[in-house]
Image (tube, coloured by chain):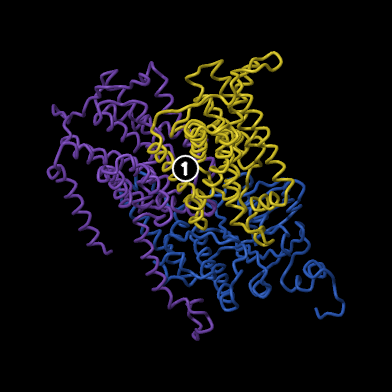
Chain colours: A blue, B yellow, C purple
Amino acid sequence: MSTLLATQNLTRRFGGLTAVADFDLSVRANEIHALIGPNGAGKSTAINLITGVYRPSAGTIEFKDRSIVGEAPSKITRMGIARTFQTIRIWRQMTLLENVMVGFQCRTRSGLLDVLINTGRCREDECETARKAQESLDLVGLGNLAGELAGVLSYGQQRLLELARALATQPALLLLDEPAAGMNPQEANFLVETLFKIKAHGVSILIIEHNMKLIMKAADRITVLSFGKKIAEGTPQEIRSDKQVIAAYLGGVDEHAAP
Amino acid sequence: MEQLIFNGLTMGCIYALIAFGFILIYNAVGAVNFAQGDLVMVGSYLGILGISYWGLGLLSTMLLVIVGSAAYGYVFQRLAYYPLRDKPTITVVISCLGAGIFMKNGMQVIAGPEPLTMRGFFEQETIQLATLQVPTQSAVIIVLTILLFAIQYWFFFGTALGRRLRATANDKYAARLTGIRVRRMIALAFVISCLLAGIAGFILVPIFLASPSMGFGLVVKAWIGVVIGGFGSVPGAIVGGLIVGLLETFAASYISSAYKDVITMLVLLAVLFLRPQGIFSEAIQEKV
Amino acid sequence: MNRNMNRALIGLSLAVALLLPFTLASGYHLRLANLVGIYLLLVLGLNFVLGYTGLLSFAQVGFFAIGAYTSAILTTDYGFGFWVGLCAAAGAAGLASVIIGEPVLKLRGHYFVFATFVLGEIARLVAMNWDDVTHGASGLSGIPAPTIGGFSFDTDLSFYYIVLAFVLAGIFVSARIEKSKIGRALFAIRESEIAAEAMGIRTRQAKQLAFTLSAVFAGVAGALYGPLNTVISPDVFSFDVSVIVLVSLLLGGTGTIPGAIIGTILITLLPEWLRFLNEYYMMIYGAGIVLLMGFLPKGMMGVLENIRLGKAKKRARPRLDPPGETRRTDRQPGA
C-alpha cells in the first residue's frame, strides 16, 4: 500500500504552548484513518497544519512524495487535499448546488474572458460543474434539495453538505474535522455508509471524531493524540485495549474493568 | 522647537480625547463610530450656547456641556445603536454614519453654516512656562486632558462600576453571566464617550472655529491615531492621538502646510501595511 | 419569477430607457438622467466589492477622481479625443487598483475600510494641491464631448445615449459575472473567506478582480462626468460621494443589479422630489440611513429575498421531519 500523506516530526508551537509535538503520521491510499484524542490534544491543529492554515514550527509534511509546507491553503486543495471544518462553514445564502459547484470550480479552466463572452468552454464548464455537483450531492443523500438555500438545512444536513462540497474538489485525500458532531445515531450510520462509498471511489479519508462507535466501525487504522503527542497507533482492536489510550481518555486504568 | 511640540501636543490632546471615546464605543459594541467627530461638534455648540448666547460663566457652561453631552450620548445610543444591537456590526457602522449626517445638517439648520468662535477661557492670551510663551488656551487643553484621563483611569481601575464596564468591553457574554447588566454598561460607554467628545469640543472652540462640518476632519485624525496606537487598545488611542497631533504640526512646519494632511494619511497607510496592529495591539488571528 | 416574466421586464426596462429622453419635460431632467447613469456605474462598481465580495470600500470616489482627472487632463491640456481619454481613465483607475490592491486587500475588516477611506481622501487632497497637473482648486474646464465620425455628442440628449450604452455594458458585465463561477467564488469569499480558500479558490486574485472591476467602472464614470459637467474640481470628489454610492446600493439591495438600479434612481431623484423640504432634506437623509439599517438592512431587494427564503423553508419543511418518523431505510437522514 502506498503512502499518500506523510508527516515527520511535525511540531507547532503557539508562544509557550506546544500544540503538536514530533507528530509522525502516515495516511495510505484507499484507507480510512482516524485521528482521535481528548479535547485539546492537537487534532484540529494537525489538520490546519496539513491544509496550510498554519505553518509548522518544525517537521515536514509530504503529499504524494512532495513537500507541501509553505503552500497556500487554496493551492493545497488544488493539489488534492480537501477538508471540512469543525465549525460549519457552508455558504448559507447560496443554494446547495451552488455551494458544491464552488468546490468543483477549481478544476475548471475558464477565466474572466470566457465568462464575459460566454464561450463554448464556459458553457461546457458550467454544465460539467453542475453535473459533478449534483453527483456529489446525490452521494451524500442531499440530491433532492439541490435547489434550496443552504440556510434551511438542519445541522446534520449541513455537515453532509460540507462533505459533498469537499468531495467536489476531486481530492485524493479528504480531511474531516468531527463530521458526526451533533448527528443522531441514524445520521451517524448513514455517514459511515457514505464514508465507505467515498473510499470505494478511491479517496482516502483522515477523520477526527469523538464518536467511538463510528470510528470503530469505519476506521482501518487509528492514531491517538494526547497533549500534542502521538501515544498509540494501530487497528481499532489494538487501540480499544491499549492501556495508554484508556488512561488518556479516562485518567487512569481500572484493572477490574472489562477490556 | 519646544513651541512646535507644545502646539502639537495641544491638538494631540484633542485627538486623544476623541480617539479614547471612539475606542470606548468600539470596545463596547465592535462598531466604528463614524459620528464621533459630530459628537465633538455638538459639544462645541453647547459651549457656544452657554457662553455666547446665555452669557453663562465658565463653570456653568462646562456643567452645561457635561450634562448636555451625557444626555445626548444616551439618546444617540438609544436611537442609532440600540435598535440594531442584534444585527451585524456593519449596520451599526452605517447607522452611526447616518446619525452623523443627521447631526451635522441638523446643526446647520439650527445654527447656520458659518463658523463660530469664542474668546479663550482666560483673559490672558499667553502665559509664561519656563522659557516659553504659550497660548493660555493650549495650556488649558493640556491640563484639562490630563485631568480627564486621570479621572478615567481612576474610574475604570478604581471603582466597581468601572470594573464592570471593563468586563463588558472584554467579553459581553461572560459579563452577562456574572450578572452585569450589559445594556446599561453599553449605554454608559456611549455616555462617557460623548462626554469626552463634548468637553473636547468645548475646549477646542477658542483655537479652532466651530462649524457644523468640523467633525469630519477631527474624526479622521482621531482614527489615524487609533490605528497608529493600536486598534482596540486604550493607551494606544491616547498615544496615537498625541502622535498624530505632533506629526501634523511638524509636517506643516517642516514640509508644507498644504500637504500636511496627505502626509498624515500616508503615515497611516504605512502603518496599515507594515504593522496594522499599531503600537500596542496584538495581531488578531481568526480561529479555524 | 419565471424566465419569461424576467425577459419581459428586462425588455420593458430597455424600452423605457431608450425612449426616456423624449418623455422628459425639460433639459434639466435629462441632465439628471445622465447623472443617474454615471452614478449607476459607480454603484455597480461598488456592487462587485461590497455586494458580491462583502468588502466595505470607500475608495470609489478615489477611482472616480482618477478617471475624471485623467481624461480631463488628456482632453483639455493635451488635446486628445474623448475616447482616448476614456481608455486612459479606465486604465489609470484599473492600474491604481492593482497597485493599491496588493497591500490593501490583505487587510481585514475595519483596517480595510479605513485604508479605502484614506485612499479616497488622498485622491481629493492630491487633486486639490498638485497645481501643476490638476490645476488645484480651480480644476479643469472646457472638457470636450465625445465625437463619433464628425458627430459631436454635445447635447444632453445625444450624450444620454453614450451614457446609456456604458450603463448597459456595465449591467451586462455585472450580470455575466454574477451568474458565473467568478460570481460564485466572490459570494463564497463574502460568506466565509476561510472556507473559500479551503475549496481551492484563489481568494487574493478574486478580491483583486472585484476591486479592479469596481475601479474601472468608476474610472469610466469619471471620464463621462467631465463632459457632462464640462468642468471638474476637487470639491466634487469628497467623501460624500462615497456615502451616496454606498447608500444607493444599500437602499436598493446590496449584491443585486436591480437593487443597484433602483437605489441609484431613488437616491438621485429623492432630493428633487423632496425639494420642498429645503435644508431639512439632508437631516432626513441622515435619519433615513439610520432607519434604513433598522428596517430594511437588505434594501428593497432584500424584502423579495426574505419572501423567497420564507417560501424555501416552507417547501423544505416536510422533509425536515426527525429521523424517528422515517421507516424506510433508503430515505435520507432528516428527510
| Residue A257 found in image quarter | bottom right
Q: Is residue B219 visible?
A: no
Question: Which of these two is toward me, B216 or B145?
Answer: B145
Image vertical order of residue A132 relative to residue C137, above or below = below
Q: Residue furthest top?
A: B131
Image vertical order of residue A153 relative to residue B113, above or below = below
Q: Position of residue C289 (x, y in %)?
A: 40, 48
Image vertical order of residue C259 relative to residue B124, above or below = below
Q: Residue furthest right?
A: A255
Q: Which residue is mark 1?
A: C205
Question: Which of these two is toward me, C128 or C319?
Answer: C128
How many marks on residues? Answer: 1
Q: Position of residue C69 (x, y in %)?
A: 34, 26
Q: Is residue C184 visible?
A: yes
Q: Position of residue C38 (x, y in %)?
A: 28, 38
C30 relative to B95 in the view: left or right: left
Question: Which of these two is toward me, C149 or C111?
Answer: C111
Question: Which of these two is toward me, C167 or C88?
Answer: C167
B130 relative to B140 in the view: left or right: right
Q: Which amino acid lies under the numbered mark 1 shown in the image of this protein? A: Gln
Residue at (52, 60) in percent of width and height: A166
Badge 1 crowding class, 10 Å Cα cut-off, few under 14, some 14 to 19, many 20 or more, is: few
In the rendered image, which quarter contains the N terminus of chain C?
A: bottom left
Q: Chain of mark 1?
A: C
Dot 1 falls on a residue whose secondary structure is helix
Q: Residue furthest bottom?
A: C327
Q: Position of residue B128 (x, y in %)?
A: 67, 16
| Residue A147 found in image quarter | bottom left
